Image: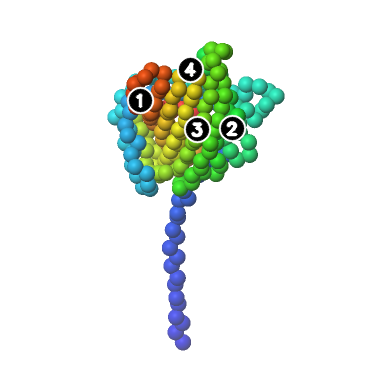
Amino acid sequence: MRKKLTFFSMLLVFVLSAQKLTFDRNAYRPADRIVKQQVEFKDPGSSGKELTWDFRTLQPINEEYKLDYFIPDSTRMDTLCGMEHNTRYYYSQKRDSLWAVGFENSTTLMEYLKPELKLHFPFGYGDTLRSNFEGTGQYSHRLDLKVKGYTRVEADAEGELLLPDFENVKRALRVHTLRYYTQTGRDSIEMQLDTYAWYAEGIRYPVFETVKTNLIKKARKQGEQGKDTTYPFRHLHI
């Protein structure tokens, strides 16, 4: 009697899970120092999947500056400060969210009465969030300031990121933050900021950023027109 042998072949398909930002891996952390390099601007491109961003040929503008994170008050361990360009930016990290709560420097103090939601964890491709924020403060300790606006955050793109010095990120996640606000006080201004931040898997902070500021209206001088400026950054070390 002849036996019939049947062989089953199994095709194993390995699917790489999409990158997601999480509180454990991407929340800001005290005692971290980031060294940044400013380079010339290049348009961040469209949204979508399986994209390629080639930033390899961008020329340096500012070789190196630092961003330091620390706890400014030991009695409020959930409040973190990021020190950059002689300005302290204050954040609150609670549960699954990162909030901006104010900032200060040698001339300006601002406290957000309604905090600005920066990220909600986990956060992956296609996720969006929006928050309204309001704040009050002072300029030179004598002139009252008020700010009011909204922030929209979207993980809008995935793909390969090609960086200067031959650094490549195969599976980068891009997060686009649109921040619009009006401020009254020393100047009355209407401002919009577009920030694109690329994250690499296993690295806590963005490895590349572009920031475009659009001064829509400034009412201090009659007839003064708004303008666009661009500030791209590349993170060197974490």
Q: Which residue is depicted at the point 36% across and 33% down?
A: 163
Residue in front for this viewpoint, 88 or 15: 88
Residue at left offset 68%, top offset 23%? 74
| Crowding at mark 4 (Cα within 10 Å: few <14, some 14-19, many 20+) | some
Query: Which dot marks residue 149?
Result: 3
Estimate the spatial distance between the alpha carbons at disc 3 and disc 2, rounded to whole Å: 10 Å
120 and 224: which is toward the camera: 224
Asked whether 52 or 6 is in front, the reply is: 52
Give the label on residue 226, or none. 1
Q: CA distance from mark 1 to mark 4?
A: 17 Å
What's the CA distance linking mark 4 and mark 3?
18 Å
User: In the rendered structure, which amino acid carries the disc numbered 4?
Assistant: Arg
Do the numbered discs 1 and 4 sit on residues whose CB atoms are within 8 Å?
A: no
Alpha-carbon distance for marks 4 and 2? 21 Å
Image-quadrant location for residue 89 = top right
Q: Is residue 122 left or right of residue 171?
A: right
Q: Sequence order check: which comes first, mark 4 or mark 2?
A: 2
Crowding at label 2, few (<14), some or many (≥20) Cα neighbours within 10 Å?
some
Whether tag 2 and tag 1 are in contact, CB under 8 A, the answer is: no
Q: Earlier in the sequence, mark 2 or mark 1?
A: 2
The outermost residue toward the front is 222
Q: Residue at x 60, y 27 (%)?
A: 80
Q: Residue at x 44, y 84 (%)?
A: 2
- Between discs 3 and 2, the one toward the N terminus: 2
